[in-house]
Amino acid sequence: MRTASIARRTRSAMALVAGAALLGLTACGADTEETPSAPAASSDGGGTQEAEPDPVSEATSDGTEDAGGDDQDAQGDQSDGTDAAEGAGERTRIMLSTDLGLDDTSGEGALVLGSDALAALLADPFGGTADCEAELVLAPGAAPVHCLGPASIESTEPTQEWVAHVVMVPADSGFQDGSSVAVLFSTGTALPEEAEDLLDEDVTLTGLGFGSVYGMDPLSAEDVAAGTLQTLTSDNSYVPVDKMADWEDVTCEDGLDFAQFETVDCAATTADGTTWDLVVAPGTYVDNDQGLLVGIDRTSDD
């Protein structure tokens, strides 16, 4: 009986030890499961920490925004430049045609240059094509004719607006004796009002090219006078007048800015003391070097 009682006590003690061990294991398991949640707990303020931004993502985002801003700025600058270019406009360019290829010996009314012949006259220096709306009556004061022709030697398609005007050039015997008809082509839809003196029937035209950079900067009155005297005394002018008078001196009232197609008043004096009134315009020739277009008023000595 005593042995059995000891055995029961021994089994009871062992059961208590086993139970305690199981309780310890359970407690350890609970601690192990809760451990991962500990780092997600608090920062200094006791709240949940937010994830820090990715430096690579920030750099990429900033770079893209900066590039976009630069692109927009560049586009803005380009737009401003385009607007300025469109607002600046372009110089009036001219072409003086003195050889019209017509027989003027019939004496029956005013000569007429047909639309096809007028277009050929415009297109020929460019080696391109042109189209004119109507015939041009070769008489002082005749209505101008609108054409489409090449814009330059490099662009020979008929895309540039031109106007054909009847003008006068010195007669072979001298500007004092009379004049012959010629055609002045100018770009645009009309000759600028400030240059309409060139169309006066008493003004006979000639001109001379000096060089590709002539007139790039505004010319002073003295520059215009010197160029005009050279035009009058050169045998290379469109219509040479060097033998028609003994030209001695030229004075001009103002200078010329080739950005504006207008005339300036000048006066030429010959060796015998005669004074001839002149009108001088920029020689913005498309088929020659830049120079001057000079009109001599053949009635100014009356």
Image (tube, rainbow, N blue to C red):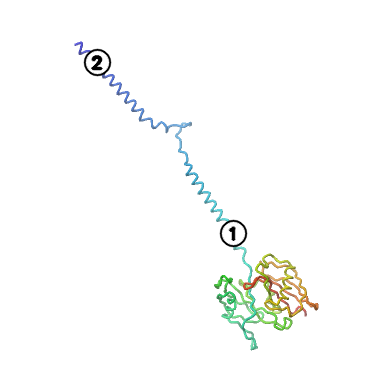
Residue 163 position in % (x across, y down): 61, 75
Disc marking residue 162: none
Residue under label 2:
10
Amino acid type at mark 2: Thr
Q: Is residue 272 left or right of residue 143?
A: right
78 shown above or below 286: above
Amino acid type at mark 1: Gly
**Residue 95, visible in the rendered structure:** yes
Residue 26 appears in which quarter of the rendering? top left
> If the image is split into quadrants, where does the C terminus sit?
bottom right
Identify the residue shown where x is 47% and y is 39%.
52
Q: Is residue 9 left or right of residue 201?
A: left
Pick the front one: 90 or 193: 90
84 shown above or below 113: above
Residue under label 1:
81
Residue 165 appears in which quarter of the rendering? bottom right
> If the image is split into quadrants, where does the N terminus sit?
top left
Q: Is residue 213 left or right of residue 42?
A: right
Seen as rendered, the residue at the extreme left is 1
**Residue 193, visible in the rendered structure:** no
Element under disc 2 = helix
Pick the front one: 3 or 82: 3
